[in-house]
Image (cartoon, rainbow, N blue to C red):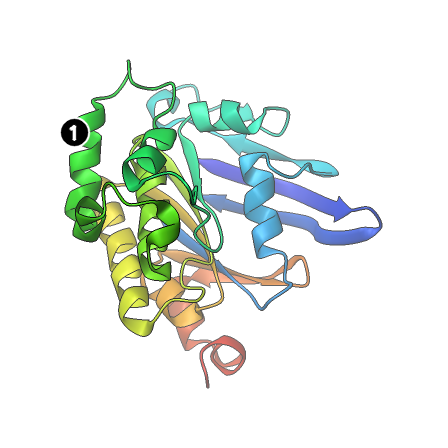
Amino acid sequence: MLKVENLTVAYGDIVALEDVSFSVDDGEVVSIIGANGAGKTSLLNTLMGLVPSRSGRVVYIDPSETGNGRGHDILPLSAHERAGMGIRIVPERARVFPNLTVEQNLRMGVYGLSGRINVEEAFGEVFDLFPVLKERRWQAGQTLSGGEQQQLAIARALVSGPKMLLVDEISMGLMPKLVDLVFSVLKRLNEDKGLTILLVEQNAVQALAIAHRGYILETGRIALEGKASDLMEDTKVREAYLGG
C-alpha cells in the first residue's frame, strides 16, 4: 500500500532523515519507534506533504487499484491531494481548532466530502468510538481535557473514512488509562475495519503490542526491522526501548 524508498529530509544543513526505506501493506499496523529527535515526526509530516523531501520516492497504491500494481509517487503531490487519496494524519499533541466546537472540528475533517460520504453516519461511528465527544459536541475544543482533545484529533481524521491513517506520538502527555484507550481504539479499527495504520511512537511497548511489524528509527536512519513480536523479544530493543 505504501512503499518508501531512500527518503531523505533536511532542514537546511540539518538532516532529519537519511536514506529511509520501509513499507506498509494493506490492512497492516506498522509501528516506527525511536527516541526523541530520531526523526519520527519529520517522517510522517513528509509522508503527508507537510514537509518537503530532499530525495527519494513514496509510492502509494490505492487498495481499490491494486490490480495495476503500479501505484503513484505521491511526493510531488500537495497535502490536500494526498488527503483526497485517502491518507489522513493524527498530528502530535492533539492539534485541534481551539475556538471551534467538537462538531465544527469534526466537520473540518469532512470538508469538501459531504457529497461523497454520509456525514451524520460518519459522526455516529466516531461517537460510538469516543462517547465523551458526543457529550461535548457543542463545547469549544479548548475547553476539552488533553485526553478529550486527543480523542477529537483521532475522530477528526476518521470521519472522512480514510484508507490509511498516519498517527504521530498518540500517547504523548496522556494518563495511562487514556493511553490504553487510544491504543485499543487503533487496534479495533484495524481488526474490525481493516484500517491500515502507520504509527510513530516513543511508547514502544504499546506500539509494538498492536503492530504486525515494526521499525526502529535512530538519528534519522532505520536501524532494525522485523515482526513486532520478534522486536519485543530482541535484547537490544528491550534494553533501549522496553525497559529491559
Residue ID at (20%, 52%): 132
Figure check: 101 above or below 82: below
Asked whether the viewer can see residue 192, the reply is no
Name the foreground residue: 79 vs 106. Answer: 106
In this view, the residue farthest toward the top is 115
Residue 210 image offset from top left, x and y in percent? 31, 60
In this view, the residue farthest toward the bottom is 244
Label 1: state its secondary structure: helix
Marks counted in the figure total 1
Figure check: 128 above or below 222: above
Residue ID at (29%, 52%): 186
Name the foreground residue: 239 vs 169. Answer: 169
**Does residue 238 appear left or right of residue 156 in this picture?**
right
Name the foreground residue: 68 vs 78. Answer: 78
Q: Which residue is mark 1?
A: 121
**Does residue 183 appear left or right of residue 84 in this picture?**
left
Q: Quadrant of residue 181?
A: bottom left
Residue ID at (40%, 26%): 62
Q: Callout 1: few (<14), some (14-19), or many (20+) C-alpha neighbours within 10 Å?
A: few
Quadrant location, the N terminus:
top left
Asked whether the viewer can see residue 169, the reply is yes
Figure check: 149 above or below 110: below
Residue 35 image offset from top left, x and y in percent? 58, 68
Q: Quadrant of residue 216?
A: bottom right
Amino acid at dot 1:
Glu
Residue 148 image offset from top left, x and y in percent? 31, 55
**Does residue 153 appear left or right of residue 120 in this picture?**
right
**Does residue 205 appear left or right of residue 14 in this picture?**
left
Residue 197 image offset from top left, x and y in percent? 38, 46
